[in-house]
Each structure stands twice: as C-alpha cells, then as structure tokens.
C-alpha cells in the first residue's frame, strides 16, 4: 500500500473539490429526500453515509478546533453563517467526496488489501476503546461501524492511487520548461514603444525596468500555463539575451528579455508537477463520467437539525490521529 494514504484529505479534496460538494455537485444528480432510512444522512449510488459516521467526523473536528480556539468560537459569524454551520458544511462536503470515491472503487472493482483491512480492525479497536459510555451512546457507534469508517476512508485513497497509477503520463522537456526573464510592463503603448526604442539604442534593460516597469518583479521564472497566452507565446519563443517587441497583454504592454531558455533543476521539478496535474485531470474525467449518471439522495433536514451544543459532553478528538498512526508514512 502506498504511503500516500495519509494524504487522503489533502489529495482527495484537491482533486475532487472540482466536482462540487454533495449539495452542489455539477456531475451528480442530487435529490433532497426523506426516502432514506431514519439515520441515513445521504446515499451516493448504493453507498450510504449514516448519521453516526457523520457525527464522528463532526465531533472530532469540532473538538480539535475547540482545543485550539476555545468552545466559544462556534457562535462567531463566518460570512452569512456561524462557524458551527460552516464546519457542518465542510464535514458534509468531505464525507460526500469520500463516499463518492468509495462508490468509484466499487464500480471499478477495487477492494481494500487484506493487510489494510487488518489495520482498520486494529485502529477501530483502539479508537472505540477511547470512547466513554456517553460518547458511544450519543454518537451511536460500535466497534464494527468504526472499522467500516476506517475501511472506507482508506478505500477512497486506494481507488485514487489505483486509477492514477494506471495512467501513463509523459511530459516533454518543452512542456515542463521553465525560463528566466526580465520584464517591463507599462500601461501606455507610447511609453512602451519609447522604451523599446531606447533598448534598441543600447540602454540597459534592468535599469529601464527599475525606473519604469509597473510589474511587481523585474526578473521572473515562468512555466507554461502561469501567464496569459499572449505573454507565453512571446516568452517561450525567445532565445537567450533576445529582447521581444512590444506586445499587449494583461491590460497593458510588455517588453521581455530572455535570460535563460531552460533552467534545468526548476524544469525537472516542474516536470513532476505537470505529470501530477495531468494525472489529476485524467482522473477527474473518469470521475465525471461515472458521477454524471449517479443519483445522490440527501436528508437535508436531518443534518440541519444537528446542533453542536447537543454534543458538548462528547470530547473525542483522536479519530484521524489513530488513522494516521496505522496508515501514515511510518506504516
């Protein structure tokens, strides 16, 4: 099993947030319903999220924040809502994204390796033992349900790893190339043309840039996709020490001087970044295709009436810490 498992939230949220939250997916047909089981918060395809699972996520994150900022924080405004309501929306989003991944795993017949099932069992035993009677009753959990939570959490990452490992990505040196430039940016075309004429007559580029340019930096490293297309087309066509003509972009006018057409260390690191982005793009296409015809059902009222003040005597905050201890980099 890859060590990326411990990056489930960081990775899945980065990749899958583009698909939207449970209540606002652009790729999933969401039906607000009361047709689910009494304690079934939502269902994506045939994958359910039960209220005890949502309460474990919610209370663990709530208590982690309280340990840092204090219990009074939840009544503070956060835009048009309170911090408490904002946390609930974030937990719902996380669960929706994770369960979508579990559904994707099912559809592609991806299962959890036995080794990870055993880890999930041990993790569940440890976490469940940390709960007191009040917490068990209020959360509505048992050891088996905790184990299923850990298995789903892990399976979501397993699905992502398996699918992206199957994607072969080749990034050319030119695609990953990072160049070094000096730049002059001004708002008036007449000034830009005057500066270009002075450069043609031998004046120093850096001196003119320091005196006239409105850009935040004179010297910049640029990769493909970071600047406007007009800027990129000119910049990546320059040779070393070549100065461009004046061109319009970004609401003004640029003159560029190429200092280096290829920065080897930076370009090699960028090649890995571009490959990861391409894998994520291709993964997103697989995800979108599946979710386009998947119906999600959601008991909105069940979540709306969940009140953080009802769980003030639930102090558990180690659900994710226990997960990390079994599935983190050290495993």
Image: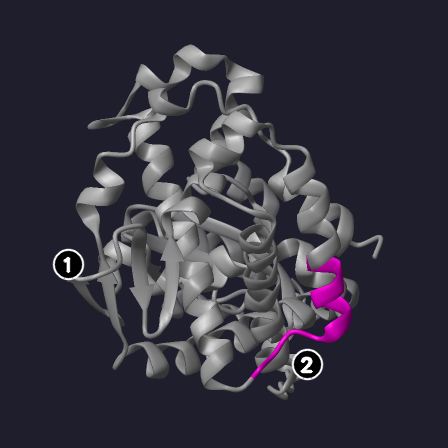
Mark 2 lies on a secondary structure that is: helix
Q: Which residues are magenta?
A: 110-120
- Mark 2 lies on residue: 173
The quarter of the picture where residue 27 lies is bottom left
Number of marks in picture: 2
The mark found on residue 298 in the picture is: none
The quarter of the picture where residue 161 lies is bottom right
Bin the neighbour count of mark 2 within 10 Å (Cα to Cα): few under 14, some 14-19, many 20 and up: some
- Mark 1 lies on residue: 33
Q: Quadrant of the N terminus?
A: bottom right
Is residue 283 covered in magenta? no
- C-beta proximity under 8 Å, tags 1 and 2: no
Bin the neighbour count of mark 1 within 10 Å (Cα to Cα): few under 14, some 14-19, many 20 and up: some
Whole-angstrom CA distance, mark 1 to mark 2, is 52 Å
Q: Earlier in the sequence, mark 1 or mark 2?
A: 1
Q: Residue at x 60, y 45 (%)?
A: 206
> As drawn, which residue projects farthest toward the right?
330
**In this rendering, position of residue 55 left or right of residue 111:** left
Q: Residue at x 26, y 58 (%)?
A: 37
Is residue 116 covered in magenta? yes
Viewer-side residue, 286 vs 243: 286
Visual colour scheme: one colour
Q: Quadrant of the C terminus?
A: bottom right
Q: Residue at x 21, y 52 (%)?
A: 299
x and y percentages locating residue 261 in the rendered image: 67, 70
Decide whether the magenta segment is chiefly helix, strand or loop.
Answer: helix
């Amino acid at each position: 099993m890859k060590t990326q498992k411990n990056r489930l939230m960081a990775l899945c949220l980065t990749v899958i947030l583009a698909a939207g939250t449970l209540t606002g997916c652009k790729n999933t047909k969401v039906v607000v319903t009361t047709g689910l089981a009494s304690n079934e918060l939502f269902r994506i395809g045939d994958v359910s999220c039960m209220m005890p699972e949502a309460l474990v996520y919610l209370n663990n994150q709530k208590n982690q924040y309280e340990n840092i900022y204090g219990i009074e924080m939840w009544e503070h405004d956060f835009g048009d809502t309170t911090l408490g309501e904002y946390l609930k929306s974030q937990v719902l989003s996380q669960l929706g994204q994770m369960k979508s991944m579990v559904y994707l795993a099912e559809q592609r017949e991806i299962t959890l390796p036995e080794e990870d099932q055993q880890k999930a069992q041990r993790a569940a035993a440890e976490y469940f033992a940390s709960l007191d009677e009040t917490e068990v009753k209020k959360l509505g959990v048992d050891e088996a349900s905790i184990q299923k939570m850990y298995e789903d959490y892990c399976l979501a990452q397993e699905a992502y790893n398996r699918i992206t490992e199957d994607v072969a990505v080749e990034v050319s040196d030119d695609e990953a190339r990072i160049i070094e430039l000096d730049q002059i940016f001004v708002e008036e075309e007449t000034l830009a043309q005057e500066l270009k004429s002075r450069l043609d007559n031998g004046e120093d580029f850096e001196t003119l840039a320091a005196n006239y340019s409105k850009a935040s930096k004179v010297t910049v490293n640029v990769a493909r996709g970071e600047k406007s297309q007009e800027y990129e087309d000119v910049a990546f066509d320059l040779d070393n020490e070549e100065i461009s003509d004046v061109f319009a972009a970004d609401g003004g006018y640029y003159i560029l001087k190429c200092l280096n057409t290829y920065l080897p260390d930076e370009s090699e690191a960028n090649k890995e970044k571009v490959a990861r982005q391409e894998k994520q793009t291709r993964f997103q296409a697989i995800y979108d295709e599946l979710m386009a015809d998947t119906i999600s059902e959601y008991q909105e009222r069940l979540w709306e009436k969940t009140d953080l003040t009802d769980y003030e005597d639930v102090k558990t905050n180690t659900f994710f810490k226990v997960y990390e201890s079994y599935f983190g980099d050290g495993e």
